[in-house]
Structures are given as structure tokens and as C-alpha cells.
């Protein structure tokens, strides 16, 4: 016996503000900044960092976007799922990725007003200086995107991989 039940999901929320259209120069500058920040950062690692920052900041649009981009780049579903509990799931990641995730959390949260020396030093062991500078830039940029997404209540679910911002 089969039943034909359609799941009724909650309605999609409405975007508060289309900031990209209303502040096009800022949006274009963010796109250029994002492109500059991603240079020299391995694509899968970049997506893991973007997903983790977006989880912390509760940016649903960025989670949708960067999870899809990570999958398109060949990342595994398992590693994406484990990101929210990466400290308990360290065996899914390399030491370099773990250092990047720890740095992502420190730069994203900034609760104590600084990035702890031990977190920075751990990252510095795994990344050359120029690569570390790019990683910090990428973490900073995704945090800015998250803030635009959350403040303007951008709607997730419609992003297709490779279609940026």
C-alpha cells in the first residue's frame, strides 16, 4: 500500500533588502575582493573554511552556496557534514585543514578580541606566509559576505554551483 503524501515545508522567507542592487559599487568591490582573497588558497580548503565560518555566523545562503561549490569541487558529503563538529571529527581532516579550521573559528568569533598566539602559530606551521595571508583574507571576506547575507536575510536554496554571489 502506497500513500501519496506531499511534504508541506514552511514558506520561504522574504529577503529584507537587495543590497547588491542598492549598493552596486560595494557589491562589485566585494566580488573583486573575494576573487583576490581566494588566489593561492586550495579550492576544497577554501570551501571548507567558507562553510565553517558560515555555520558560525548562521548564514543560510552562504551555507547553501559553499556546500554546493564544495561538492562540485569534489569534496565529500561526509567531510562537509562533519564540519560543525570538526573538533570531534579530526580524523576526517588533515593537520593543515585542522589548522585552517581553527584559525577560521578564531578570526570569525573574536570573542576575546584577538586571535590566540597558539592558533596563529599552528596555522603558520602549515602555511607559507603568503598563503597564510591569503587564507586570512579569505576568512575575512567570507565573514563580510555572511554579514551581508544575514543582515539582508538572503534566501538560500536557489544557488547553482559556480554561480557566484
Image (cartoon, helix red, strand yellow):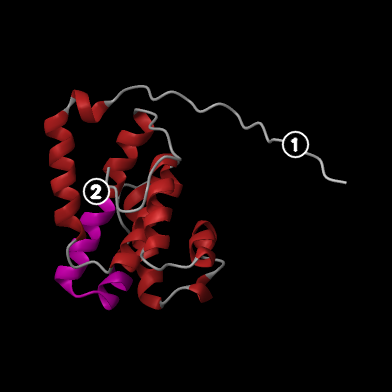
Residue occupied by mark 2: 141
Residue nearer the viewer, 88 or 117: 88
Distance in Å between CA atoms under marks 1 and 2: 43 Å
Disc 2 secondary structure class:
helix
Q: Within the magenta stretch, is there residue 125?
A: yes
Residue 55 visible in image:
yes
Q: Position of residue 138 (x, y in %)?
A: 24, 56
- The residue range painted magenta reads 120-141
Q: Nearer the viewer, mark 1 or mark 2?
A: 1
Residue occupied by mark 1: 5
Residue located at (21% from left, 59% from top)? 38
Q: Residues within 10 Å of mark 2 (few under 14, many from 20)?
A: many
Disc 1 secondary structure class:
loop
Residue nearer the viewer, 58 or 120: 58
Q: Residues within 10 Å of mark 1 (few under 14, many from 20)?
A: few
Residue located at (31% from left, 22% from top)? 17
Pointers 1 and 2 in contact (C-beta within 8 Å): no
Determine whether 34 is above or below 119 in the image. above
Amino acid at each position: 500500500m502506497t500513500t501519496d503524501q506531499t511534504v508541506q515545508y514552511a514558506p520561504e522567507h522574504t529577503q529584507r533588502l537587495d543590497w547588491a542592487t542598492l549598493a552596486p559599487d560595494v557589491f562589485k568591490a566585494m566580488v573583486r575582493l573575494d576573487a583576490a582573497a581566494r588566489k593561492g588558497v586550495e579550492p576544497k580548503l577554501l570551501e571548507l573554511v567558507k562553510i565553517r565560518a558560515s555555520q558560525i555566523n548562521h548564514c543560510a545562503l552562504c551555507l547553501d552556496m559553499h556546500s554546493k561549490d564544495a561538492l562540485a569541487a569534489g569534496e565529500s558529503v561526509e567531510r562537509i557534514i562533519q564540519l560543525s563538529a570538526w573538533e570531534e571529527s579530526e580524523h576526517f581532516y588533515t593537520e593543515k585543514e585542522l589548522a585552517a579550521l581553527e584559525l577560521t573559528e578564531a578570526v570569525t568569533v573574536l570573542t576575546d578580541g584577538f586571535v590566540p598566539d597558539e592558533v596563529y602559530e599552528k596555522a603558520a606551521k602549515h602555511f607559507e606566509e603568503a598563503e597564510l595571508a591569503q587564507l586570512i583574507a579569505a576568512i575575512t571576506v567570507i565573514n563580510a559576505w555572511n554579514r551581508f547575507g544575514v543582515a539582508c536575510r538572503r534566501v538560500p536554496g536557489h544557488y547553482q554551483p559556480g554561480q557566484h554571489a
